[in-house]
Image (cartoon, rainbow, N blue to C red):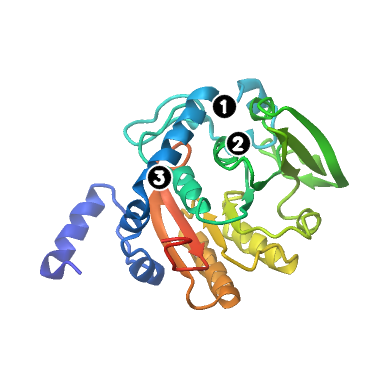
Amino acid sequence: MLGPIGKSVKGALTKAGYEVTRATGLERTGLRSFWEDWYSKDPALFGKLYAANRATLRDVGEWIKEADLAGSLWRYGVPEEWNTRRQGLGRTGLNEMEAEPTYTDLIAFIASQIPDLNYLEIGVSVGKNWLQIIENFPDAAIFGLDVEKPNPTVAKRFQDSKVVHTAGKFDVETLSGTPAAVQLEHIEFTRAGLPVTYVRGDQFAPETWASLRGKQFNFIFSDGVHSARAIEGEMDHLLSNELLADGPFVMYWDDLVNTAMQSAFERNVALLTKRYGPDSWSGLYQIHGTYGAKRMNGIFCSFTSPSYCV
């Protein structure tokens, strides 16, 4: 697209360390003016949600104790280099606050357009995104799913908790290489008198998803195991257990960092488009997460109407 100077520009960018690839069909047709679309829809509302998220981040400060990270199965998905310190320009540490818009700001903005929000987060990690969503939507039905125990730092912010469902145990892989037994259980936290449910289970185990049957989620955030297998598997479980609401419906994916994961995203978008119809919308784009550098994210929205997505 750069004409006769294209090869020279590509060569210079490659030498500078950039990876130059051809845009996918989704990027060409779906990306459009995504940022302008959702920013311009209601900038006052976005500003309100952005401010509320920064207030939550300031209030928590330290998101997890080092001892809790060390005693966990997978360090809650937090690489050691991101735990505390800034990694450089545009690279925020776990306990720092990102000034630029994050996927949490975007998720909160889109979720605010959906009536009767029923939210599922796959891969809660330390709960940095999950808690911000809970704070923004106190009346919503909010679920989180992770193989780790609830982060004690976040668990302390609720009034009380109780186990409302248990099932079998599963042997899961761990960062140490030694398998660990995980009890499938639903933990119900109470905040302002309303329940929030944390599902501890293996996302690769069919029983984990079967335990959610009867729920109808209209916003799902996928941030669990970062592999094409996991992305495809969770979609198959969501569909086979009838966990998707009829609409409006939004699904959001973080960390689509390689072509295999992006292909899995396209495959899932095709399945969702078949379910929700040709008027749905999807796209890939880069945005900051709760820590780290910008990364590729993906979104599917069952409606193109401004009332719901973009």
Instruction: Say few, some or many: other residues with alpha carbon within 10 Å of mark 2 (under 14 / 14 to 19 / 20 or more).
Output: many
Vertically, is 31 above or below 54? below
Instruction: Say few, some or many: other residues with alpha carbon within 10 Å of mark 3 (under 14 / 14 to 19 / 20 or more).
Output: many
Q: Position of residue 190 (x, y in %)?
A: 73, 34
Q: Is residue 8 left or right of residue 74?
A: left
Q: Position of residue 185 (x, y in %)?
A: 81, 43
Q: Earlier in the sequence, mark 3 or mark 2?
A: 3
Residue at label 3?
46
Question: Label 1 sits on what residue type?
Answer: Trp
Q: Quadrant of residue 72?
A: top right
Q: Which residue is pictured at 46% across the width and 46% down the height?
A: 103
Q: Which residue is pictured at 32% across the width and 62% down the height?
A: 21
Residue at label 1?
63
**Disc 1 and disc 3: Cα gap in Å?**
24 Å
Q: Which residue is pictured at 71% across the width and 43% down the height?
A: 147
Q: Which residue is pictured at 45% across the width and 40% down the height?
A: 49
Disc 2 and disc 1 in contact, CB within 8 angstroms:
yes
Question: Label 2 sits on what residue type?
Answer: Gly
Where the N terminus falls, by quadrant? bottom left
Q: Nearer the viewer, residue 217 or 269?
A: 217
Q: Is residue 43 left or right of residue 230?
A: left
Q: Earlier in the sequence, mark 1 or mark 3?
A: 3
Q: Is residue 258 left or right of residue 7?
A: right
Q: Secondary structure at mark 1?
A: loop
Instruction: Say few, some or many: other residues with alpha carbon within 10 Å of mark 1 (under 14 / 14 to 19 / 20 or more).
Output: some
Q: Position of residue 14 (x, y in %)?
A: 25, 53
Q: Secondary structure at mark 3?
A: helix
Residue at label 2?
127
The residue lying furthest to the left in this view is 4
Q: Nearer the viewer, residue 240 or 69?
A: 240
